[in-house]
Amino acid sequence: MVKMNASTYLGNCSEEHFYDTSEFRYTITSIFYSFLFIVGLPVNITSLWFLVRGKKGLTEIKIYMISLTVADLLFVIFLPFWIDYSYRKGNWIFSSFMCSLWGSLFYINTYNTILLLALISFTRYLAVSQPVKVAQSTQNVRGFTLTALIWTTTICISLPTLINHKQHVIGANGSNLRCFEYYQEEGTKIEVLIIHLVMLLGFIIGFGVVIANSALILRRLSIDKKTLGPSHRLKTRAFRMVLAVLVIYIVCFLPYHVVHLFWTILVLNFWVSEDCTTRKSVNDVHQVSLCLMCMNCILDPILYCFLTTSFRQYLNELIQSWSRKCTMRRSPTLQEIQLS
């Protein structure tokens, strides 16, 4: 989302086509984001209902999960704006503030998720390595504090984007208004590169935490593999959750951050390419990696909520309860039977 001008290295690329992507991009993304909205909205609402209204009390890890679901839900609610943008082949018809708000929510969701998933994996490791200590202590204060810190940090970083919202909707290709797609010069190359390197560093730290916790829990499982008691089952469940977090990192966040680094280097002309085809190919891959990263809004609740035994039991009880209520409403009363 960094803006800069096409430099003197345009070669065969005119400025009009400098950031073009293939036509298939808008068709695919409009379909893909529609799928995410249709699936993600009920899935996240159901997950939030389960986490808030579940039988078990509030715990540190549940605080992180609720926060994660709220971030995903906010992201999904605003997806129709991006669906419309893709359907119109990259033409933003809403206000510049809505463009900046969408972009801010995109990064708030992304880096909230990265940091919260790292905290979830670390909390699972503590539950495995120090079960007695964790059971005897109440860490809800830590959960609320870290969650508030993460939200405050990501929102504060996004504030300049919201304040300078008019800079992010730029006319391109005649009448089209591009939202975070048409770049003009703003800041120096080094400053822009530092911003993206900090983003990459945040991902690397979170990814490293998840990998380390997965390895440590797996090591403990291998040590007491002969033990089949409650302790072993607890560690197995913890490892499954951390493994689910690792899957989200690999599927959603790893491709984007790898591709985004090359895309940034190309955009800043640290990697000089005078071939429009090369630039278009990099832009296409970058757009595909963006779609993969957006998948976290449905993978998060599916992996850490829908696949758990407690959620399936809760959902089964909820369905049975609704079924009984519907049956009672449809069943005729004794008075109705006598009148008939």
Image: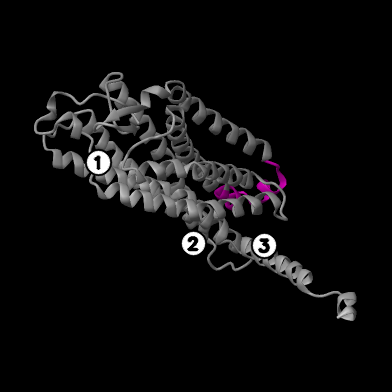
Residue that appears at 51% across and 59% down:
240
The reply to whether discs 1 and 3 touch (Cβ–Cβ < 8 Å) is no
Q: Which of marks 1 and 3 is nearer the N terminus?
A: 1
Q: What residue is shown with label 2?
A: 222
The amino acid type found where label 3 is placed reads Tyr
Identify the magenta region: 124-139
Residue at the extreme top = 187
Left or right, residue 82 beside residue 194: right
Left or right, residue 321 beside residue 105: right
Q: In which quarter of the image is the N terminus?
A: top left
Between residue 309 and residue 241, name the one nearer to us: 309
Residue at the extreme left = 12
- Report whether residue 250 is seen: no
Q: Earlier in the sequence, mark 2 or mark 3?
A: 2
Q: What residue is shown with label 3?
A: 314
Q: What residue is shown with label 1?
A: 283
Relative image position of residue 168 (x, y in whole percent): 37, 27
Residue that appears at 32% across and 33% down:
178
